[in-house]
Image: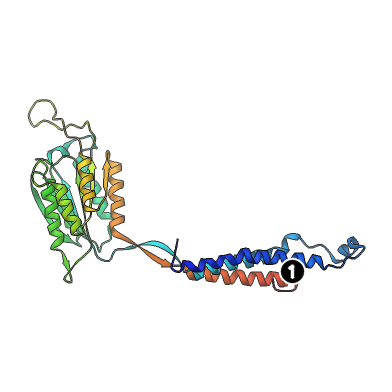
Amino acid sequence: MSFGSPLFLLALLLVPLALLAQAASRRRARRYAVRFTAVPALRAAAGTTPAWRRFVPLALLLTALAALAVALAKPQRTVAVPVERASVMLVTDHSRSMMATDVKPSRLDAAKRAANLFLDKLPSGIRVGVTTFSDVPDGTLAPSRDHSDARRMINAQIADGGTATGDALAVALQALANDRQNGKRAPAAIVLLSDGATTTGRDPVEVGREARTARVPIYTVALGTADATVPNPGFGPPVLSVAPDPETLRRIAEASGGRAFTAQDDNQLSAIYKALGSQLGTRTTHREVTSAFAIGGLLLLLGAAAGSLRWSGRFP
């Protein structure tokens, strides 16, 4: 909860001041009270009134004052609304290390499922593009509102080759630079999923700095566990050293102004992509809720007046 005019919250001081005024008034009334004899007989003749009724109108009045003071301060709540126009590039690694089965059924299959879930969470108005890579960026789809093209490209990947992360990020960054709507570039972001260290091409951290200059944050996801293996293309033992490289991916994200995530299983990866889909597909905004407090305050005032007239024959 935030406030458009927080200075008006000082009006809340009226609540304790009203309480002090009420207490002073009751003391003054007792000072000038006229004492009568046979009070029990008079009380029996007049009938008994529950003590709590005397405090209900005052409590309603004070609550009404508080609600109206908050209304004057223009309370606002933060809500998420769909982004009307934005572009996202999915950069996915399908190098040979993505054959590892530490994430079932394999890293690449888990990545495909998670990417499809990511697309499910994005509003239809978001433009999505894809860059796939191994030794080189071998496929690029410009951002489009037709998410089915992105799905087909993601699902067609086959694990093989090395890892050219920097080159792939540079291609994705250029695709976003060329993506113009009404002559202007829309807000944009890159989501990178890779499991291994860069083995060829440009330094990806340097490309991350270029992305920050272009105001394109990169969200990185490191997939896999440290002791993973992949099948040997011959008949020897499994090929080792296919651990993810979360440190480099973290540096890429920080250099670009994005965030880094780590996923060691299919469920974690799906949860990350689901959260990113919601995050990139919406933006936060402030909406005033003044009317709710104002109406509530007025209703409480009416309740205080009605209760006071009903039980004491006067306004509070």
User: For the point 23% across and 33% down, which residue is it?
Assistant: 226
Q: Quadrant of the N terminus?
A: bottom left
Q: Is residue 308 above or below residue 123?
A: below
Q: Nearer the viewer, residue 119 or 35?
A: 35
Callout 1: helix, strand or loop?
helix
Label 1 Cα crowd, 10 Å radius (few <14 / some 14-19 / many 20+): some
Residue 271 position in % (x across, y down)? 31, 46
Q: Residue furthest top?
A: 236
Identify the image quadrant of the C terminus.
Answer: bottom right
Residue at the location (41% across, 67% down)? 287
Q: Quadrant of residue 39?
A: bottom right
Residue 278 image-quadrant placement: bottom left
Q: Position of residue 123 (x, y in %)?
A: 28, 60
The residue to which callout 1 is attached is: 311
Residue closer to the observer: 170 or 155: 170
Residue that appears at 72% across and 63% down: 53
- The amino acid at mark 1 is Trp
Residue at 78% over, 67% down? 29
Q: Position of residue 178 (x, y in %)?
A: 13, 63
For the residue pair 230 and 77, the one nearer the viewer reads as 77
Q: In the displayed structure, would residue 173 be above or below residue 163?
A: below
